[in-house]
Image: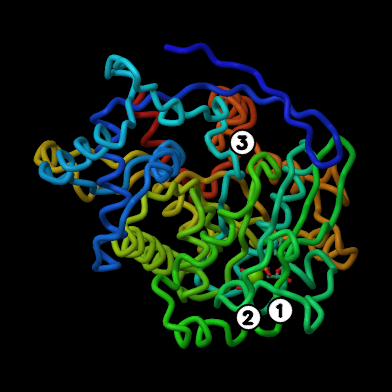
């Protein structure tokens, strides 16, 4: 195993950011699998035997190192054998092949990735729920604020044509007409540098920053324009765009979505490694949640995406004290966070068990959210000591762990020391009596 190495990258302000890089070694078999998993589906879609150059190899391996293996990937032995021969013929030797005389090991096959931070272009998450007004935008803006206050560089993407993130939450103007914008980039009309779509919102002390790709009026009609242009994979446009970001510029990329399961939400999902789900304590929430999870799975299958991480739910916008109905839904939501109960008969079939969907933080309805919006500032920047800011820092820490920028033990410690109060129905006198008699 090669040792890790520390490399200093000056960022655009000349501040040196250290990153530990660790080597990722692929064996010949893994490299052949990776080519099969990534290149073959593309070739199949093109319906052509396009030539693939050896420069494609590191790109493919980086994809796998970043996103993991595609979900449900079942390799075809003949194709794996084909790629194995191809790699050897191309002289792409991997660590497990002894170096042959006159043929150098292609060192690019052995990538360096930031240690723990597997996302050199930034960890990407989006705030998803097709229900309107559940707090998606408030969650994204607030989380970005917490991350920036913690010194991270955040890029926001406003995929909602309503533009609430751009205008209401952050107090920015929409992109002026004639300037390149997100809508033009999504439908392939703008192909210039992504930097020209980005503006800075704020730069709290400590090296953090919030930049944003703003929405525009044209986002209202962009879906039609995307279909009209007959592009090959309209769901992949945002991913393609964000893949142009230079490495090491952002630590997080957070996308705000419209309240629907449409092409824009699909784009956000295809471009994200993780998903945050804001929920309300309303009777319709459970059904909405089921629809959302089904949509995520369908898209993963359709686009052969690696499994997205369902980072967790964030119940919000409820009044305190909680009503009985609120608590009834709260209890159901909390149950989703528990590992699925394993019945004896289920032992063999691991197939359709849902992974636990934990609750990350609580964002009750408090006036400060609207006050921060009126100021065009994020809540953690506007009122760092506010109780909701503390909740948003919880979500920020969870994202740091997902991104490999903080150890998982930090999250466990936070949960142990500051557990969230339960939203479930309070125990009745009857329950208490039963519990006591059970104990005796
Ligand atoms: N915890 C909170 N306390 C008080 N007000 C909040 C809170 N969260 C959000 N709001 C306010 O509630 C309204 C709806 O929230 P938000 O815009 O974040 O929801 P959304 O899901 O993004 O809506 P849409 O589906 O329209 O995009 C906004 O005016 C916002 O300022
Ligand atoms: Mg919104």
* Residue 34, above or below 47: above
Query: Can you see residue 343?
Result: yes
Q: Quadrant of residue 14?
A: top right
Asked if labels 2 and 3 touch by Cβ distance under 8 angstroms, the answer is: no
* Residue 230, above or below 337: below
Q: Decide which of 226, 246 is in the foreground and name it.
A: 246
Asked if labels 2 and 1 touch by Cβ distance under 8 angstroms, the answer is: yes
The response on whether ligand 2 sits within 8 Å of label 1 is no
Query: Can you see residue 160?
Result: no
> Residue 301's spot in the image, x, y percent?
29, 60
Quadrant location, ligand no. 1: bottom right
Residue at numbered disc 2 = 219
Disc 2: CA contacts within 10 A as few (<14), some (14-19) or many (>=20): many
Q: Which mark is residue 400?
A: 3
Residue at the (51%, 11%) spot, across then down: 3
Residue at the (72%, 57%) spot, across then down: 141
Residue at numbered disc 1 = 216
Q: CA distance from mark 1 to mark 2?
A: 6 Å
Q: Earlier in the sequence, mark 3 or mark 1?
A: 1
Which residue, as the protein is rendered here, is positioned at the far front?
Answer: 102
Q: Is residue 36 left or right of residue 160?
A: left
Q: CA distance from mark 3 to mark 2?
A: 31 Å
**Secondary structure category for the residue under label 3:** helix
Q: Is residue 112 left or right of residue 64?
A: right
**Secondary structure category for the residue under label 2:** helix
């Amino acid at each position: 195993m090669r040792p890790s190495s520390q490399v200093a990258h000056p960022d655009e302000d000349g501040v040196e950011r250290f990153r530990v890089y660790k080597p990722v070694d692929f064996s010949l078999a893994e490299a052949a699998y990776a080519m099969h998993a990534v290149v073959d589906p593309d070739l199949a879609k093109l319906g052509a035997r396009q030539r693939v150059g050896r420069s494609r190899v590191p790109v493919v391996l980086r994809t796998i190192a970043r996103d993991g293996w595609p979900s449900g990937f079942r390799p075809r032995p003949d194709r794996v054998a084909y790629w194995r021969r191809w790699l050897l013929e191309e002289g792409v030797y991997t660590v497990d092949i002894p170096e042959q005389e006159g043929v150098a090991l292609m060192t690019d096959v052995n990538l360096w990735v930031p240690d723990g931070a597997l996302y050199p272009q930034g960890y990407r998450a989006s705030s998803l729920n097709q229900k309107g007004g559940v707090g998606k935008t408030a969650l994204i803006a607030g989380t970005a604020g917490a991350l920036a206050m913690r010194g991270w560089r955040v890029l926001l993407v406003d995929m909602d044509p309503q533009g609430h993130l751009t205008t209401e939450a952050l107090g920015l103007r929409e992109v002026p007409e004639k300037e390149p914008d997100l809508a033009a980039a999504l439908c392939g009309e703008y192909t210039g540098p992504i930097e020209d779509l980005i503006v800075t919102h704020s730069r709290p002390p400590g090296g953090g920053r919030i930049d944003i790709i703003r929405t525009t009026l044209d986002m209202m009609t962009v879906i039609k324009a995307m279909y009209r242009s007959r592009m090959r994979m309209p769901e992949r446009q945002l991913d393609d765009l964000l893949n142009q970001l230079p490495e090491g510029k952002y630590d997080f990329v957070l996308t705000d979505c419209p309240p629907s399961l449409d092409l824009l939400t699909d784009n956000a999902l295809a471009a994200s490694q993780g998903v945050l789900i804001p929920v309300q304590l309303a009777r319709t929430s459970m059904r909405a949640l089921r629809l959302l999870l089904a949509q995520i799975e369908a898209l993963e299958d359709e686009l052969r995406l690696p499994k997205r991480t369902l980072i967790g739910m964030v119940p919000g916008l409820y009044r305190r004290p909680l009503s009985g109905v609120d608590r009834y839904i709260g209890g159901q939501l909390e149950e989703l966070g528990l590992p699925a109960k394993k019945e004896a008969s289920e032992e063999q079939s691991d197939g359709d068990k849902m992974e636990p969907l934990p609750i990350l933080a609580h964002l009750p309805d408090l006036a400060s959210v609207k006050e921060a919006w009126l100021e065009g500032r994020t809540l953690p920047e506007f009122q760092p000591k506010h109780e909701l800011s503390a909740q948003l820092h919880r979500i920020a820490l969870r994202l740091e762990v997902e991104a490999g920028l903080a150890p998982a033990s930090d999250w466990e410690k936070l949960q142990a020391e500051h557990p969230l109060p339960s939203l479930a129905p309070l125990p009745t006198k009857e329950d208490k009596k039963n519990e006591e008699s059970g104990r005796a």
